[in-house]
Image (cartoon, rainbow, N blue to C red):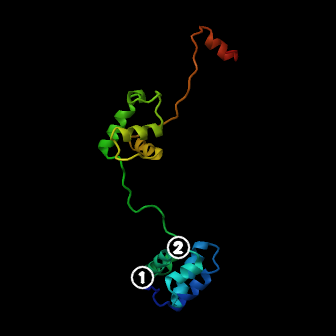
């Protein structure tokens, strides 16, 4: 069983702001206020979680955040990761660039046009990436290479010498 955790003792102005936040239009702020006030009354995290309808670890996280930052813990922070690791090192970026300068048919694919999904699949099978990655990961890698990516266009042509004239008239 985990050790009980409680919020620090509240100052009177903090208590007033928390009670006012219970009526906030933002459900995130209202729920956090409920958690902090319940903890200040001596209720334990599992019971608060059951009452609020969330995980008890969420309650613990709110209590720790309030103890560290005070009322600033009521505001939703960024959900963006603090650190981002890229799977594409400079060496792998160059390998990807070299891969895309070849035809997918060289790798046993039944098309001559690269798609982001196909580039991800082939870069994994060729050992450029250690695992299968998403299309978006390939797109971001191409952006780092300053390569613009456009969908392939299908061109219709004909051996008919009159094709261009007929096409412009809408006959072809």
Residue identified by numbered label 2: 75
**Spot occupied by residue 73 in the image (x, y as percentages of width and height):** 49, 76
- Residue 152 visible at all: yes
**Spot occupied by residue 98 in the image (x, y as percentages of width and height):** 34, 33
Q: Nearer the viewer, residue 85 or 147?
A: 85
Badge 1 local density, few (<14 within 10 Å), some, or many (20+)? Answer: few
Give SS at disc 2: loop
Give residue 104's quadrant in the image: top left
Q: From the viewer's perspective, is 118 left or right of 159?
A: left
Residue located farthest toward the left when viewing the structure as drawn = 91
Q: From the viewer's perspective, is 79 left or right of 169?
A: left
Q: Nearer the viewer, residue 112 or 148?
A: 112
Q: Residue at x 50, y 80 (%)?
A: 71
Q: What's the CA distance linking mark 2 and mark 1?
A: 27 Å
- Residue 148 visible at all: no
Quadrant of the drawing holding the C terminus = top right
Q: Residue at x 34, y 38 (%)?
A: 126
**Spot occupied by residue 116 in the image (x, y as percentages of width and height):** 47, 39
Q: Residue at x 43, y 46 (%)?
A: 140
Q: Residue at x 48, y 36 (%)?
A: 115
Q: Nearer the viewer, mark 2 or mark 1?
A: 1
Quadrant of the drawing holding the N terminus = bottom left
Residue identified by numbered label 1: 2
């Amino acid at each position: 069983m985990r050790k009980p955790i409680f919020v620090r003792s509240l100052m009177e102005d903090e208590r007033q702001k928390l009670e006012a936040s219970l009526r906030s239009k933002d459900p995130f702020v209202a729920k956090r206020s409920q958690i902090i006030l319940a903890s200040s009354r001596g209720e334990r995290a599992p019971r608060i979680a059951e009452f609020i309808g969330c995980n008890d670890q969420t309650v613990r996280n709110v209590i720790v955040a309030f103890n560290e930052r005070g009322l600033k813990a009521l505001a939703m922070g960024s959900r963006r990761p603090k650190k981002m690791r890229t799977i594409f090192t400079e060496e792998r970026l160059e390998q990807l660039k070299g891969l895309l300068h070849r035809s997918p048919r060289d790798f046993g694919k039944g098309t001559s046009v690269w798609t982001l999904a196909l580039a991800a699949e082939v870069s994994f099978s060729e050992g450029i990436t250690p695992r299968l990655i998403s299309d978006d990961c390939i797109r971001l890698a191409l952006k780092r290479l300053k390569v613009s990516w456009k969908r392939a266009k299908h061109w219709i042509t004909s051996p008919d010498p009159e094709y261009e004239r007929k096409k412009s008239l809408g006959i072809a």
